């Protein structure tokens, strides 16, 4: 059964179960028999503040739990939140291939960092620990005329070489081709 849950309640589940652990950035949580999800306003200044960001998703191991949980949440969100779009990130350096997002019909929306990692790296949130580039995933709750423009990679030379990586509604960029052509 679906349940809106406090951030604190969801964070207790994350301890020892999620590689990033609890988060302080979430504004609301979702907890059910499949696991927990925590949401916030997008942390990227380039994304609209009225979208949602899924900042943690922790499943408890039941087969097909992710797609079942996401289906419930998306149905609830369409009638209870104003957001048109949910964005999240997977970390290939942790072995996360986006399989869960793809199974739940999310679209791949690459950032220029993912298509061409900067020579200086992707920043550091912890002293001495460089972050790996992430894959960005997007789920449309309802139409939003801004989405394609906001998610567009603003690098014309890169898009000439990889037009298939451009975000287009409704299916995003061609992640399968990206994985086959680019070493991860």
Image: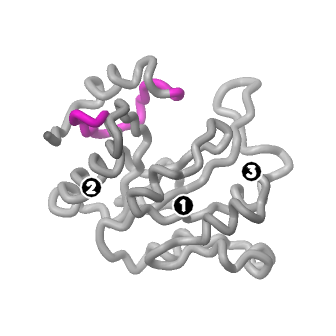
Looking at the image, which is closer to me, 126 or 176?
176
- Left or right position of 28 against 109: left
- Left or right position of 87 against 155: left
Mark found first going from the N terminus, 3 or 2: 2
Q: Secondary structure at mark 2?
A: helix
Relative to residue 52, is residue 5 depicted above or below?
above
- What is the basis of the colouring in this image? one colour
Mark found first going from the N terminus, 1 or 3: 1
Q: CA distance from mark 3 to mark 2?
A: 29 Å
Q: Residue at x 26, y 57 (%)?
A: 74
Relative to residue 136, is residue 171 depicted above or below?
below
Looking at the image, which is closer to me, 79 or 173?
173
Mark found first going from the N terminus, 1 or 2: 1
Q: Main secondary structure of the magenta part?
A: loop
Label 2 sits on residue: 71
Q: CA distance from mark 1 to mark 3?
A: 25 Å
Label 3 sits on residue: 184
Q: Position of residue 127 (x, y in %)?
A: 71, 24
- Left or right position of 6 against 23: left
Q: Residue at x 64, y 61 (%)?
A: 111
The crowd level at tag 1 (other Cα within 10 Å; few <14, some 14-19, many 20+) is few
Q: Residue at x 63, y 65 (%)?
A: 176
- The magenta-colored residue range is 19-35
- Left or right position of 155 against 76: right
């Amino acid at each position: 059964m679906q349940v809106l849950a406090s951030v604190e309640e969801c964070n207790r589940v994350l301890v020892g179960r999620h590689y990033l652990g609890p988060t302080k950035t979430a504004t609301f949580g979702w907890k059910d028999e499949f696991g927990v999800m925590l949401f916030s306003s997008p942390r990227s200044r380039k994304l609209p503040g009225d979208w949602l960001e899924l900042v943690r998703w922790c499943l408890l191991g039941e087969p097909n739990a992710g797609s079942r949980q996401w289906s419930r949440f998306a149905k609830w969100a369409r009638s209870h939140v104003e957001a048109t779009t949910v964005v999240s990130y997977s970390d290939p350096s942790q072995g996360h291939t986006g399989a869960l997002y793809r199974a739940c019909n999310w679209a791949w929306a690459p950032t220029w960092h993912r298509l061409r990692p900067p020579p200086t790296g992707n920043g550091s949130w912890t002293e001495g620990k460089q972050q790996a580039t992430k894959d960005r995933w997007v789920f449309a709750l309802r139409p939003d005329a801004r989405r394609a423009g906001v998610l567009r990679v603003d690098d014309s030379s890169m898009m000439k070489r990889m037009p298939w990586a451009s975000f287009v509604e409704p299916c995003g960029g061609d992640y399968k081709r990206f994985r086959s052509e680019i070493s991860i």
